[in-house]
Image: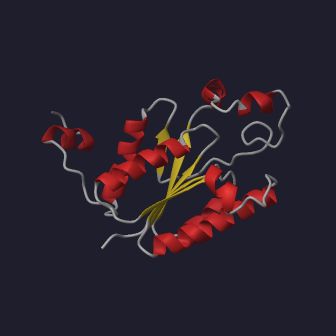
Amino acid sequence: MQQGFVLWFTGLSASGKTTLAKSVEAELLARGLPYIQRLDGDVVRQDLTRDLGFSKEDRDENIRRVTFVAELLSKNGVATTCSFISPYRKARANARTRCHNFIEVYTYCPLETLIERDPKGLYAKALAGEITGFTGIDDPYEEPENPDIIAHTGKETVAESTELILHYLEQQGLIPPARRSVKAAQALRGEAG
């Protein structure tokens, strides 16, 4: 019987939240988990929360609605990934108390690297004053104080960060262990080869 859980990816824009969520989802499917749902900030804003803007109140309401959906999914045995900037600690703390097996994944990447990456050109626009209220530039991001997992996406590959998350899920007994070679298992445990 599959246990439900919520992997809550939080971090600044372009820090790798969606990329990691997709990578983890693919690995969970490969391991045969039958019930997986990915909730992504861009997609959710098109349907569930398109009536909301980007004020603090609207951001909090956005996360409140997502938390409600994630709570229902996780309590009904669905492995749920949530990829949202979710800049405020209080909103993330609320999600933690409501969702079954909540795991906060902080996708940390230095701001300088994010500005260099800037795949959508949003940092450039925010720095030029063309858009305001941009998280990390002129709107706050409250970093997680005690995340369950920190993915250092500025220096780790997607595969490395994915493996870190999967290993954590295995340790918590939320997913079956992958079949690994003896050498790979020793490396994960930090043993000498």
List x then y, in percent, for residue 91. Answer: 67, 62
Report whether 34 appears left or right of 132. left
Report whether 179 appears left or right of 47. left
Give the quarter of the image for residue 52: bottom right
Query: Is 184 in front, or is 78?
Result: 78
* Residue under the image location 57 percent in, 72 percent down: 98
By what rule are the colours in the image chosen? secondary structure
Q: Is residue 90 visible?
A: no
List x then y, in percent, for residue 102. Answer: 49, 64
Q: Is residue 177 above or below residue 173?
A: above
Q: How many marks?
A: 0
Q: Is residue 16 above or below residue 172?
A: above
* Residue under the image location 47 percent in, 70 percent down: 74
Report whether 193 appears left or right of 81. left
List x then y, in percent, for residue 50. Answer: 74, 58
* Residue under the image location 54 percent in, 40 percent down: 16
Query: Is 139 in front, or is 74?
Result: 74
Q: Residue furthest front?
A: 47
Q: Residue furthest top?
A: 116
List x then y, in percent, for residue 32. Answer: 29, 59
Q: Is residue 11 visible?
A: yes
Q: Is residue 20 above or below residue 111?
A: below
Q: Quarter holding the N terminus?
A: bottom left
Q: Quarter holding the C terminus?
A: top left
* Residue under the image location 70 percent in, 46 percent down: 141
